[in-house]
Image (cartoon, helix red, strand yellow):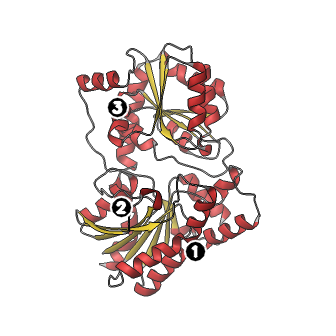
Amino acid sequence: MNILFLTLVISDDINERGIYNDLMRKFRDEGHNVFIISPNERRLKKKSSFLRIDGITIIKMKWLNIQKCSTIEKGISTLLLDFMFLWGIVKYLSEIKFDLIIYSTPPITFEKSVKYIKKRNSTKSYLLLKDIFPQNAVDMGLIRKNSLMHNYFRKKEKVLYEISDYIGCMSPANVQYLLKNNKSLSPNKVEVNPNSLAPVNSAVSPQQLEKIKNKFNIPENRLILLYGGNLGIPQGIDFLIQVLDSNKQNDDLFLIIVGSGTEFSKLLHWSNQNNSNNCLILNQLPKTEYDNIVKVADVGLIFLDKRFTIPNFPSRLLSYLENEKPVLLATDIVTDIGRLAEKNNFGFWSQSGNLNDFNKNIEKLLKDKSLCKQMGDHGYKYFIQNFTAAHSYNIIMNHFEQKIF
């Protein structure tokens, strides 16, 4: 099969790990021809490029900034993004007949590109739904419900769902939300297709762990809690700061925060004001260095803003589970990520904003050190059974193999 994948983010190095890189490599390894189109944001100062890397074609289109830019530029770039994808298809892939087009949200502005390919090649389409927009922006107070902007993007969202032959959602709660709020959708086209990675052997020796700890001045004989990922409004950073503040005198803990985003400065301000000796705050690290910190951590942390009415499912969960780390989650009550963690015994959940319950969950791990090992083992087993790239690949191909071959 010829596969076309449209996405906002893909590494130039297709062998670098990531939920999309790993899935596309799986398609390649199963004998498919994979073509990817993604933007080259102008802040990177790179021209458009056509790359053939280890059997996968990656087309990077020079484009406006989408991330780390002003709201105005991001809005204009997102609105016009569909034309960028369409131009990439016409300019570079006019001779290729595609059997399947896959695309991931964000953004939701794929309509013209998807319709064009479906009409040109009678192609089947598969949406990997990683973001429910514009409702997430409404939840965070960035867009007013029923405003002109909200209604415009809501219409775009509905059209994208309608033209997709199949929609893969991150969790059962996402499936339920989508069907409840989009009555015209057939349940037969909506399914769970979770975030996934290709497993790797990440075992390290005690000597290597000691070197990593020494490099970052991570103390011995403490429970090491790690948060890694975006540090923006959706993550409810104000509550994370409450957690840090309430534990700044707790010598049994050491908290590590790694990431970047609009709220990173708040964390730095807190750190400068408090001079805590049990907290390390780092700006975004190279992936190999971040992966090393995951290995020395005892517990992974996940935070989501309590205002969300859509069921987010952060992909950072995967690296925690793959590295056999139990998870402490503080989220809204709509997402099912916490229920999944507790049901399968790889984590503890509390509602975002409930500091007492969150700290009680920390105490559970402090009082019973064997819990970390037990829950880490359960998490790794769950990861292997449910969150691998092969699992996601099979879910997609169950719809198409019989029809195309």
Label 1 or label 3, whichever comes before in sequence order: 1
Q: Give me the disc on residue 162.
A: 1
Q: From the viewer's perspective, is 259 left or right of 398?
A: right
* Residue 82 position in % (x across, y down): 52, 73
Q: Position of residue 75 (x, y in %)?
A: 61, 63
Q: Does dot 3 land on a helix, a strand or a loop?
A: helix
Residue 247 visible in image = no
The label on residue 393 is: 2
In this orientation, which residue lies closer to the viewer: 110 or 84? 84
The Cα–Cα distance between marks 1 and 3, rounded to whole angstroms, is 43 Å
Above or below, 324 relative to 122: above
Q: Which residue is mark 3?
A: 295
Q: Residue at x 45, y 58 (%)?
A: 193
Residue 226 visible in rendering: yes
Earlier-in-chain disc, 1 versus 2: 1
- Answer yes or no: do the residues labelled 1 and 2 have beta carbons within 8 Å? no
Q: Amino acid at mark 3?
A: Lys
Q: Position of residue 220 (x, y in %)?
A: 37, 16
Query: Where on the picture, by quarter, is residue 249?
Result: top right
Mark closer to the chain start, 2 or 3 = 3
Q: CA distance from mark 1 to mark 2?
A: 22 Å
Identified by mark 2, the residue type is Tyr
x and y percent of residue 92 in the render? 35, 78
Residue found 53% across the figure and 59% down from its top? 66
Labels 2, 3: front one: 3
Q: Is residue 55 left or right of residue 227?
A: left
